[in-house]
């Protein structure tokens, strides 16, 4: 391992140690999703997946 990889690993660990308490606080105090929120997320996601599948099928055939 060279010094660049070691330094990157140290900085990554330091960043995780710094972010961990803030992440726990944000998860604890964030609003919970309702079924309407999930529908609003899943419908566009399914549309994008279907569009990408359509594009892949058009390229193959």
Image (cartoon, grey):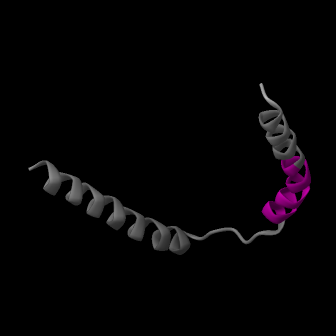
Q: Is residue 3 left or right of residue 61?
A: right
What residue lies at 41% left-to-right and 64% top-to-bottom?
A: 45
Q: Is the stretch drawn in magenta largely helix, strand or loop?
A: helix
Q: Is residue 47 left or right of residue 3?
A: left
In this rendered view, identify the residue nearer to me: 16 or 20. 16
Magenta stretch containing residue 50, yes or no? Answer: no
Q: How many marks?
A: 0
Question: How far across and down, in percent of the image, does residue 46 sit?
Answer: 36, 62
Quarter of the view holding residue 58: bottom left
Question: How far across and down, in percent of the image, does residue 17 sit?
Answer: 90, 47
In this rendered view, identify the residue nearer to me: 31 or 58. 58
What residue lies at 91% left-to-right and 54% top-to-bottom?
A: 18
Magenta-highlighted residues: 15-28
Quarter of the view holding residue 6: top right
Is 53 above or below relative to 37?
A: above
Residue situated furthest top in the rendering:
1
Question: How far across and down, in percent of the image, does residue 12 sit?
Answer: 81, 45
Is 4 above or below relative to 25?
A: above
What residue lies at 16% left-to-right and 53% top-to-bottom?
A: 59
In this rendered view, identify the residue nearer to me: 12 or 37. 12
What residue lies at 82% left-to-right and 58% top-to-bottom?
A: 23
Viewport quadrant of the N terminus: top right
Magenta stretch containing residue 21, yes or no? Answer: yes
């Amino acid at each position: 391992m060279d010094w660049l990889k070691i330094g990157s690993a140290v900085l990554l660990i330091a960043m995780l140690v710094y972010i961990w308490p803030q992440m726990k606080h944000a998860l604890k105090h964030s609003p919970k999703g309702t079924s309407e929120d999930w529908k609003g997320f899943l419908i566009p996601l399914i549309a994008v997946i279907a569009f990408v599948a359509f594009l892949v099928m058009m390229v193959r055939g």
